[in-house]
Image: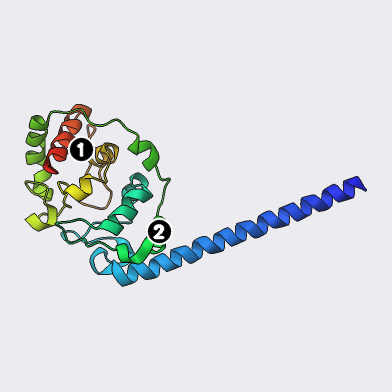
Amino acid sequence: MNKKKHHLNWLIASALIAVSGSMQTALAESKINKGKKLYSQNCVFCHQADAIGKPGVAPSLTNPEFLSTSSDKFISGTIRDGRTGTGMPPFAHLGRKGIDAIVAYLRSHAKGPNRSAKIDKQPRSQGDARLGKLWFDSICATCHGTNGDGYLAGGTGTAIGNASFLSKASDGFLRETIKYGRSNTRMIGYSGPESMAALSDQEIDDIITYMRSLAK
């Protein structure tokens, strides 16, 4: 009798787990669909279909490197607050649930794990801003503008000197982007013998330190 009861309890537990899993999947899909709708209503005009971006207008939000290095906090904070001094307005009126849904939609395009927690824990840069400026002017300014003003300066790259961007981006996030770039974009990596400029870790930290000075 105990054996039959144990088997029955096991069947009930298994059924409950299956139902719970199905409900969670349905809720996740519903959230993604809501995010897709909100994206189409608010973001598609600049970031294009499937959030692939457009050089000189808006960056790709479905780029695999971007999604693997950006935290939900970074993405949702950017949507909520926008970026002062750029073409990215704030969308706080969408509310937390609406913004979270857009983030879920963007995440649905990810092709790998989200490594942002580990990346954001990387140490802060300890560099020389004067040396960083030399590297920035010779490498970064070509696309991002002399003062990191990005599109507003006629560049094809984003405004990486923008205060509202730098207030949300960790040094680890900046370091990873400079080192490895972003595939299928004009942002190439600058670390390693096969890169256009094999910058050392210290030289990259010099650039980050200089970028931080631009926000001031």
Number of on-image labels: 2
Is residue 27 shown left or right of residue 66? right
**Amino acid type of disc 1?**
Tyr
> In the rendered structure, are the residues bearing label 2 and label 1 in contact, judged by CB atoms less than 8 Å apart?
no
Q: Mark 2: give few (<14), some (14-19) or many (20+) Cα within 10 Å.
A: many
| Most foreground residue, 81 or 136 | 81
In the rendered structure, find residue 100 and report the number of the disc placed on it.
Answer: 2
Seen at 44% across and 67% down, the residue is 33
Is residue 75 shown left or right of residue 4? left
Q: Identify residue for label 1.
A: 190
Above or below for 207 versus 113: above
The answer to whether residue 187 is visible is no
Is residue 181 shown left or right of residue 12? left
Seen at 9% across and 47% down, the residue is 142
- On the image, the x and y values in percent for residue 120 come to 33, 38
In primary-sequence order, the first of circles 2 and 1 is 2
